[in-house]
Image (spheres, helix red, strand yellow):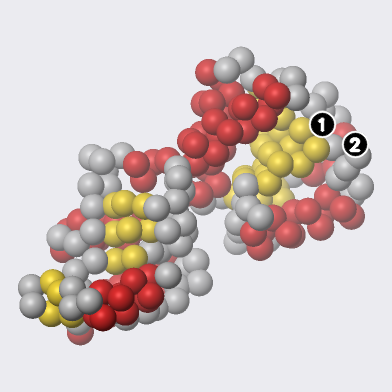
Amino acid sequence: MFKAAVLLSQQYNITIQGQFIGWQAAETGGDIISALSSTCLIMSTSNIVGIVGPAFSREAAVIAPFAKTVGIPVISYAATDPDLSDRNSFPAFYRTAPSDTIAASAIVKLFSRFNWTSCIIIYQNDEYGTGGSKAISEAFNTNGLVVMRTLVFDIATGNIRGDLAKTLTSSSTRIVVLWTEEKYTLVTLQYALDYDVLGPQFVWITRSS
């Protein structure tokens, strides 16, 4: 999509300070240091006027302050951490993906529709996960709903901290909100399948597809 927009700008002779818009791409793989290193390297060799990305909130939390320092904007297409909306902390950051507060509001409406009152949250331990968990908890508190327990998916080890099966089966709620990236969602659901804590006994709501 972005590259198509750049090609169209060149086709219609759209320029910035007399120069056609170009691009350089770098893959970060979700690694914060790699994201910062790639950004610094490209900026040292090219005339960069803006950054599209990164995809992950944990990367954006580092890249956005750096971009502010050098005076260019950052526009992420996927970083959803609500804290990134703080204009005092991240004045150079913009995004096209909705904040997690929007998703949390949608979850509240879903709970209201089915008369659910509580849930367990499983989230990954980075800006994306903690931001999402915080957004849900705040939305629940505002609307009289309850987060019974939280479990952490450790992205460093690839495991859930604590006893997933015991936590779910001993809880009075049967609704689980899973706030993880797609690859961690697949791992967590496999754990749930192995421990027989999926449907029909439990309803799982996932943030990723």
Q: Nearer the viewer, residue 34 or 208?
A: 208
Position of 42 with respect to 19 (left or right) is right
The residue lying furthest to the front in this view is 12
Residue receiving disc 2: 201
Query: In the rendered structure, which disc, 1 or 2, sits on the residue that comes first in sequence?
Result: 1
Q: Residue 35 is drawn in which quadrant? A: bottom left
The residue lying furthest to the left in this view is 17
Q: Is residue 131 above or below residue 37?
A: above
Q: Secondary structure at mark 1?
A: loop
Q: CA distance from mark 1 to mark 2?
A: 7 Å
The residue lying furthest to the top in this view is 144
Q: Position of residue 128 (x, y in %)?
A: 51, 49
Q: Position of residue 1 (x, y in %)?
A: 42, 70
Let me know if residue 144 appears in the view: yes
Position of 48 with respect to 127 (left or right) is left
Let me know if residue 148 appears in the view: no
Q: Is residue 54 above or below residue 79?
A: below
Q: Residue 19 is drawn in which quadrant? A: bottom left
Amino acid tagged 2? Gln
Q: Position of residue 103 (x, y in %)?
A: 55, 39
The residue lying at 79 percent from left, 44 percent from top is 164
Residue receiving disc 1: 174
Q: Residues within 10 Å of mark 1 (few under 14, many from 20)?
A: many
Q: How many marks?
A: 2
Amino acid tagged 1? Arg
Q: Is residue 37 above or below residue 200?
A: below
The residue lying at 45 percent from left, 43 percent from top is 99
Q: Are marks 1 and 2 in contact (CB under 8 Å)?
A: yes
The residue lying at 90 percent from left, 36 percent from top is 201
